[in-house]
Image (cartoon, rainbow, N blue to C red):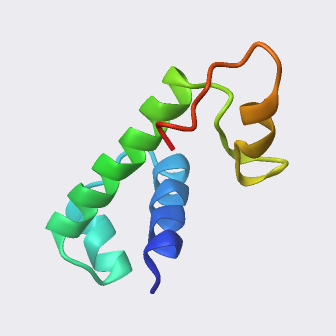
Amino acid sequence: MRRADRLYRITDYLRGRRLTTARWLASRLDVSVRTIYRDIADLMDVVRATRRFPFLSFGSSRGACAYGSALSAPGRPDVAGIL
């Protein structure tokens, strides 16, 4: 399974269940518990990035990561250095 697919499935599982353990996710996705911890950390980084830079609209209706128009939008800070 590709990493992007796995991250999507983790997000799906977390949204659909009240309580989910890393061990349960690892068994469902056939990866190690450590991989689940790493993936969760990466997902948290994405959440932090979208809170810090809200114009980076990951998962918006415009695409998986629609930041191109934000770079040229008037009044937006220059983010070329951080991407």
Which quarter of the rendered picture does the N terminus lie within? bottom left
User: Is 31 on the left-hand or right-hand side of 71?
Assistant: left
Total labels: the figure holds 0
Residue found at the very far top of the displayed protein: 75
Q: Residue at left 51%, top 44%?
A: 83
Front residue of 27/46: it is 46
Whole-percent x, y for residue 58 in the image = 64, 45
Whole-percent x, y for residue 73 in the image = 82, 26
Residue found at the very far left of the displayed protein: 34
Q: In which quarter of the image is residue 74?
A: top right
24 shown above or below 18: below
Whole-percent x, y for residue 81 in the image = 49, 37
Q: Residue at left 47%, top 82%?
A: 2
Front residue of 65/42: it is 65
69 shown above or below 13: above
Front residue of 51/36: it is 51
Q: In which quarter of the image is residue 38?
A: bottom left
Whole-percent x, y for residue 78 in the image = 61, 26
User: Is 8 on the left-hand or right-hand side of 37?
Assistant: right
Q: Residue at left 43%, top 30%?
A: 48
